Amino acid sequence: MDQDLPVIPPAEGHLPEPALAAEAVAKVLRPLARLAIDHGLQLPAVIDLLKKALVEEAMQTYALEGKEGKKGSSDTRISLLTGVHRKDVRRLRTEAEQEQSIPLPMLPLAAVVVARWISDPRFLNTDQTARPLARTPKHRQEGLPDFTMLVAEVSKDVGARAVLDELVRLGAVDVGDDGLVRLKSHGFVPKDGLRESFHFLADNVSEHLSAAVHNMNPYRQSNDMPPKLEQCIFSHNLSREQVDELHNLARNLWSKSLQPFLQAATVAEQRSQSSPEPLYQIRFGVYFNDSPVKP
């Protein structure tokens, strides 16, 4: 049994390592290639997506301070950083500006509502399960919360009925004849929702990889950037039965850690609502995978 710890670059004299980075990128690309093949995404589209990612990352992370204190980069500098032709840089920058006006999907809001539901003590039973909620204040008992109150605490911009309809569509809740909304599982697990599954795949894998990439930044220590949590435990030469037992153990351990972390995150969100300081978002996850041992 081994513990996989993040590699920490030397504090000084460490330069970018394109050859080592290429080895890592090649391995990371394999499951992405499988995803692309499984869902009919071919090379021209993948190349354009890679160009877009390079240009957007150069714009956001490597922008220079301008004369008026505004950050930005010329097409020429972005082309120099990424190797993307200036003609493509101009096109992709225009597309990125147009995409900023696209409204956020309902899914993240629905997930946040469920997270609040299973973490805030006001919405829990004494055994820490999610309390059935009256659909509207008109149907609730005095002193008890309702679904409209839950949604209003998460967002003032979207009505409770729209969120409820989305959760029903995803198979996450039931609405009984008694007017109570019941959560069907302890967490947000959309039923047969391909679009929703793609959304979580993108966010979860992106955030996990971002933490690992942060730890490999060649200038991290010289810029006083502490490492982020990004570790795993791995074991070799297991039978199928042993793999299944460990998988079940991993699920149980995650389930036990989920609620206390969500409760702490909910309290933190409430405390930071009036903070004048810059705000951040976090993501904490866990994964389990098995694959055949290579000879």
Image (spheres, rainbow, N blue to C red):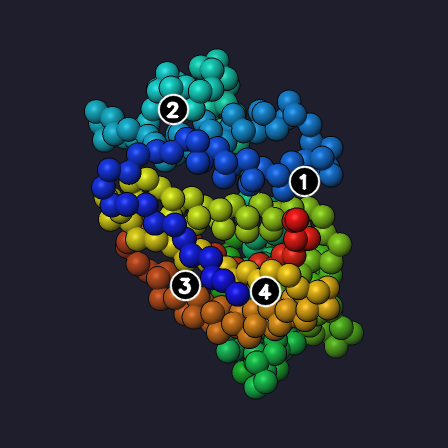
Q: Earlier in the sequence, mark 3 or mark 4?
A: 4
| Number of marks in the rendered image | 4
On the picture, is 75 further left or further right than 136?
left
Furthest toward the front, the residue is 295
Kind of residue sitting beneath label 1: Leu
User: Disc 3 vs disc 4: Cβ atoms closer than 8 Å?
Assistant: no
* Spatial separation of the CA atoms under disc 1 and disc 2: 28 Å
Q: Which picture quadrant has residue 274?
A: bottom left
* Residue 41 higher or lower than 265, as above or below: above
Q: Report x, y in % for residue 10.
A: 28, 45
Residue at image point 57% right, 86% down: 126
Among the two numbered marks 2 and 3 on one chain, the one whose residue lies closer to the N terminus: 2
Amino acid type at image mark 4: Val
Residue denoted by label 2? 81
Q: Amino acid at mark 2?
A: Leu
Residue 115 locus on image (x, y percent): 55, 65
Residue 187 image position (x, y, % from top left): 62, 66
Residue labelled with disc 1: 35
* Disc nearest the viewer among 2 and 3: 2
Q: Earlier in the sequence, mark 4 or mark 1?
A: 1
Alpha-carbon distance for marks 2 and 3? 37 Å
- Residues packed near mark 3 inside 10 Å, few (<14), some (14 to 19) or many (20 plus): few
**Tags 1 and 2 in contact by the CB under 8 Å rule?**
no
User: Comparing marks 4 and 1, which lies closer to the viewer?
Assistant: 1
Q: Residues within 10 Å of mark 2 (few under 14, many from 20)?
A: few
Label 3 and label 1: CA atoms lie apart by 35 Å
**Helix, strand or loop at disc 2?**
helix
Residue 191, how many percent across, how many down?
Answer: 73, 58
Q: Earlier in the sequence, mark 3 or mark 1?
A: 1
Residue 114 is tagged as 4
- Please give the label number shown on residue 269: 3
Q: Is residue 279 visible?
A: no
